[in-house]
Image (cartoon, rainbow, N blue to C red):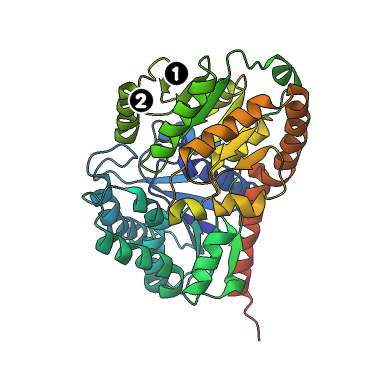
Amino acid sequence: MRIALLTHEPFYPPSGGGSAEAVYLVRELVRRGHAVHVFGPPVADPDQVRREFGIELHPFTRWRMGRTTALRSVKYLLYPSFLQRMVEVAARTTQFDLILSQHTISAVAAGRLRRRLGVPVVMNFLDFLTGFMETWPAWLMPPPALAVLKRYELSLPRRFAADAVLTVSDVLADLFVETGFPRDRLRPIYYGYDADLFAFDPAAVAVRTDSPPHIVMHGSFDHHHLGRIALEAVAHVHAERRDAVFEFIGPETGAWRRFAQEARKRGRDATVRHTGFVPYREIAARLRPATLGIVPYEESAGVHCAFVAKAVEYLGLGLPVVATPLRGLQRYFRAEPLLRFTSFDGRGFGEAILGWLREPPARRAEWGRLAAARVRRELDWRVIAANAADCVEEVAGRRQHPQP
């Protein structure tokens, strides 16, 4: 089968967030004998990537795409039309059997192409993109405009009659059902992690220390990642444990700069450390010695639909986790003792961090071992990619062998 995979992020190396999934999904599809054509922003070494993954690359070069590019939102809105045109031109010489979109932005192009090319489409939603914008300043995203964008995003599978939809969480799947999209064409596949990169190491657990407590967070540092909850949690922990260190691993974004400025105003300079961007393959080494990991997300529809990668990676390393009550995570990990949920307030979040520091290290280590074994078994990327590839093949099989 010839598959056109559409994405708005560079395929390799992963740039953060949901971009890591495409690498493992493509490997699985190629392993099964499918020819994969990736349409998206250019990669750094295209010849090497073609050889390593056994794929064809179709780079978008009209303008720079990326999480930190100028006028990002405007470019994201314009991108689907140009992406659609790229695939249509390629389809003149290559007959595609299926289109697979990664994320919301490319789903728009995929839906239009379903009508134009008459091939089945599988939409893979790794988040509820516009739902995250609820935490943006009103001047940046006016609420009336946001309401329109949210309705449009959730309507995409029904609007374009997608043949199947993969979702990152059960919560997001429910929202698509509420729009009238058939549940039997939905498959929650969740979000994975590389169990080899984020491998549980008993020796690392044995040397973890609370003197000083080392609290970590990594991510792309958007508006919903760092705000009032994180600031108040740092202050609350510091009031009892002045030796505690909070390490933030990720790029220097506008949201990060605002957070750092507020931390300085509150006299938390010595408490907060920032590493800057760290390549995906190096993050585990930064996390492994930590005492615990945090997910202090501000509330929005987007975060409730998310299946936060960092939480899975912390658990894979056996790190205790504190998170705000994100429904996507709560539904999956409701019985996981290593993951504690708080309300959406900084004081409660900080108290949960202190609660972990009061737990006996031996208990933390044992819960860590069990949690790491569970996520390796259920959420390793190979498991996620296999589930997604099964769905792709089922859709293609229905097209080739329709029911009488």
The residue labelled by disc 2 is: 263
Q: Where residue 244 sits: x, y (%)?
A: 53, 18
Figure check: 184 above or below 332? below
Mark 2 surroundings: few (<14), some (14-19) or many (≥20) residues within 10 A: many
What amino acid does circle 1 point to? Thr
Q: Where residue 308 sits: x, y (%)?
A: 54, 44
Q: Where residue 134 sits: x, y (%)?
A: 35, 53
Figure check: 72 above or below 394? above
- The answer to whether residue 365 is left or right of residue 386 is right
The quadrant of the rendering that contains the N terminus is: bottom right
- The answer to which quarter of the image holds residue 394 is bottom right
Q: Is residue 32 visible?
A: no
Q: Is residue 257 visible?
A: yes
The residue labelled by disc 1 is: 271
Q: Nearer the viewer, residue 280 or 143?
A: 143
- The answer to whether residue 180 is left or right of residue 87 is right
Residue drawn at (39%, 38%) of the image: 228
Mark 1 surroundings: few (<14), some (14-19) or many (≥20) residues within 10 A: some
